[in-house]
Amino acid sequence: MNQVYNFSAGPSMLPEQVMRKMQSELLDYRNMKVSVMEVSHRGQDFMELSQKAEQDLRDLMGIPDNYKVLFLQGGASAQFSMVPINLLRGGSVANYANTGRWSVKAIAEAKRYCDVHICTDSKENSYKDIAEFDSWNIDTNGAYLHYTPNETIDGLEFDYVPEVDMPVVADMSSTILSRPCDVSKFGVIYAGAQKNMGLSGLTVVIVRDDLIGEPVDKQPVLFNYSTQANNQSMYNTPSTFSWYAAGLVFDWIKGLGGLESMANINKEKSQKLYSEIDNSELYSNQVNPKYRSWMNVPFVLADDRLDKLFLEKSYNANLLALKGHKAVGGMRASIYNAMPMEGINALVEFMSDFEKQYG
């Protein structure tokens, strides 16, 4: 079979090296005669695996010692609840930036716990731009500020970190590990694993120590960060195979040279794809170029009657999952860390040939 490139927004493409490692160990992990899926999460072998995965992530991101790293379940969506539960700390207001569909979901959940103050709203420009930070209306009484650095659906990405006198919370599900990140600028970083870290079923949470331990009363014990931190993310059985897969991905990124190298690769990939779009008469991307995502590249065809044909022919060319989200239509190429440059080259070549024939 010819090489297949999967542009799915998540669960997403995995590095081939990681897939082959998983395949080789699937039935017999470390000569234990059983799969890693079948061993106790409290056994020595899995504990060593989990500790190495955490240390590798700390090394990659330069996570300071005064932050806990949690490997949880429930997806990033569970964090829409856990953040206000743990960070309100007696407050009644939280600042939220609305820059896309995932921001909207986080805001809706936070409203169950507090008064949400929308400090900037990109809905007015159909989520195609982000207001400069000096124009934001921040409520200084807010317990924290929450934002989504990269909006997976709309392809809108921040090029700065908001700086405020309160904890900054970031949903990094679709951008984590794509480039270096100064963790010390954040109170909480959370990310579903299924885009840049491995498999669905795992959510990584990086939380500063001083934000642990004062949850809203009468909430689920599992939603208390201190419960998870005090039990090494194993208060109940964790998603062991997803944790294992994430560890392999961390190893793979380290082998490529870490996040500086990853950033150079990702920048080159996105620039090549955006260049093809911008130099085309058939394809267009409406996001302000300053805030275009490196990870999720939405584009539309000038004649939407060609959409079905484009998807059929791209699928036949082994370029998969290019259909845009139903909320915005068109096409979307998600080009996370695991997407090699060869995949971008194949997509650009296909797009050029398609335009010549049908544009």
Image: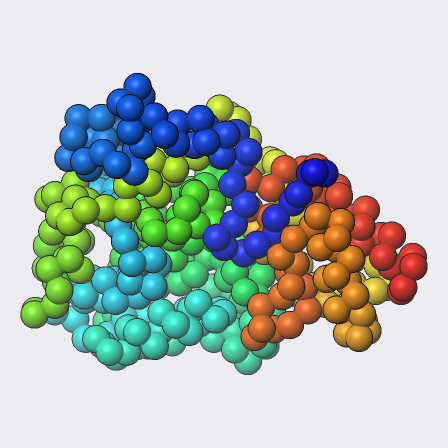
Q: Where is residue 7 drawn, in percent x and y?
A: 61, 51
The colour mode here is rainbow
Say whether residue 12 is visible.
yes
Residue 96 falls left or right of residue 345: left
Please, which residue is most extreme toward the left here? 218
Of residues 105 and 92, the one nearer the viewer is 105
Would you place residue 115 above or below residue 20 in this image? Answer: below
Residue 186 falls left or right of residue 265: left
Q: Give me the residue at 43% from left, 50% from top.
A: 194
Quadrant position of residue 322:
bottom right
Would you place residue 93 above or below residue 67 in this image? Answer: below
Q: Give me the residue at 47% from left, 64% from top.
A: 133
The N terminus lies in quadrant: top right
Of residues 239 and 138, the one nearer the viewer is 239
Would you place residue 38 above or below residue 298 in this image? Answer: above
Residue 333 falls left or right of residue 228: right
Say whether residue 163 is visible.
no
Please, which residue is most extreme toward the right here? 357
The C terminus lies in quadrant: bottom right
Would you place residue 196 above or below residue 131 in this image? Answer: above
Q: Where is residue 318 drawn, in percent x and y?
A: 70, 48
Please, which residue is most extreme toward the top here? 31
Of residues 171 and 11, the one nearer the viewer is 11
What is the count of numbered marks?
0
Q: Where is residue 207 drawn, in percent x and y?
A: 24, 48
